[in-house]
Amino acid sequence: MIPAPALAPGIGTGRTPLPVPRRRAPEGPGAVGPEADAGAGAGPVAGGPGVAAISRPSPPPSRLTDRYGRVVRDLRLSITDRCNLRCSYCMPAQGLDWLASPLLLTADEIGRLARIAVTRLGVERIRITGGEPLMRRDLEEIISAIAALRTPDGAVPDIGLTTNGLGLDKRAAALRDAGLARVNVSIDALDRETYAALTRRDRLDDALAGATAAQAAGLAPIKINAVALPGTFDAQAPRLLAECLRRGWQLRFIEHMPLGPSASWSADDVVGAERILAVLADAGFALEEAGRPDRRPAALWRVAPGEHDGAAHPAGSMGIIASVSAPFCADCDRSRITADGRLMTCLFSTTETDLRAPLRSGATDEDIMRLWAAAAWRKPLAHGSDDPGALPSGFERPGRTMSAIGG
Ligand code: SAM
Ligand code: SF4
């Protein structure tokens, strides 16, 4: 019942064809045009001097568009670079040099950026991430400030959280009360030793308790993120899928991207969507393609009721985020802000725009909007580049690893 996957050949099986946005915006003044673009992006951090970076005030933009016609509606807000796990694909065993507290955006600063994004720049969805966002004690405060916002149409922004789940059991109800709608919990394996080896911490029970409590608190749907890794995928994936179906969680496999320590990724080792589907089919799962909801990263698959390892599982669905073998850059609608207030228009951006300095030096909302829109205008075509075909590994490697960007 598995149809041939409608996926492009991935890295390891051929050259990755990168998607081209449907239309190219005219090179003239739009919401933001080349005028606002001038002078920025010359170094790794653009917009550093803050308000002074804006030489000629122009009407503030009302949405965030880029040169290829894409419009930002989704904001990923990283609130910390710290983490209590050390996933091998994300950070080195010894951790990283954490940002000093004064460098982190405060809850008020995060709330102000969220307010500008939602009430004035067309952002409809906000996902809080990190590092591990539960490591911030003021997470509830941040969420309730965002939940109080309304889009120009009067809608409540859709607020999600991506977390490793540690400690979520104690905070799920408070987070729901603050206005959190949904949660994604990262669990790569259900075998305790494998989980501990991948995350370098023996905390599987805590992660499962977190996801279970989130479900009990009514945060729905519960999505489980699992990075597809060559050494563990075949053994872990079928068990993980069966258990998620039994618990009513939607599992999403994420292709491994070159965003961790450089030695942790090799193009030839990427477990691509085709392979993911083949392994699950071999394990007896009956899958039917259900398409990719507009502008969402995961392609979905319906799973028929069945049995795995002697135990029945009900019908459900699972997703594949094929960022490597079938990237969704053509309709990417995201903007990212790091925990230290740097705007990144792409996970693989090599340039950043500093919003913290202007926030702390008296910038008006309109100043911030212009900086944000100017950066959005320069969003690269795909994989951090406007000429992705020329990249040796298919990706531009950003200056930060995943936990410091915010996944
Ligand atoms: N700590 C939280 C967590 O693990 O869910 C939030 C931050 S984490 C950086 C966000 C997501 O990025 C997780 O689902 C994680 O599995 C994923 N991730 C981290 N490094 C990755 C990589 N190199 N390739 C693909 N996904 C990655
Ligand atoms: Fe921490 Fe999430 Fe990175 Fe794992 S993936 S080390 S939980 S930030």
Image (spheres, rainbow, N blue to C red):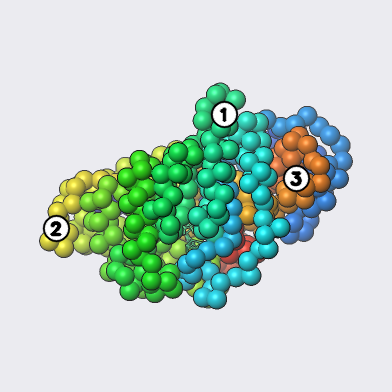
Which quadrant of the structure image shows residue 216? top left
Question: In terms of sequence position, does the residue under pointer 1 or pointer 3 come before the other?
Answer: 1
**Residue 60 higher or lower than 11, as above or below:** above
Q: Mark 3 — residue? A: 359
| Number of numbered discs | 3
| Left or right relative to 322: residue 361 | right
User: In the image, what residue occupies the spot 26% across and 50% down?
Assistant: 247
Residue 321 in sight: no
Q: Mark 2 — residue? A: 311
Residue 68 in sight: yes
Measured Cα–Cα span from mark 3 to mark 2: 55 Å
**Residue 228 higher or lower than 37, as above or below:** below
User: In the image, what residue occupies the spot 74% across and 56% down?
Assistant: 45
Q: Mark 1 — residue? A: 150
| Left or right relative to 165: residue 287 | left
- Say if mark 1 contacts mark 3, CB within 8 Å: no
Residue situated in front as seen by the camera: 107 or 31: 107
For badge 1, the amino acid type reads: Arg
Q: Residues within 10 Å of mark 3 (few under 14, many from 20)?
A: many
Q: Considering the numbered disc 1 on the image, is that residue within a helix, a strand or a loop?
A: loop
Question: In terms of sequence position, does the residue under pointer 3 or pointer 2 come before the other?
Answer: 2
Which quadrant of the structure image shows residue 108? top right
Residue 271 in percent (x, y) is at 39, 65
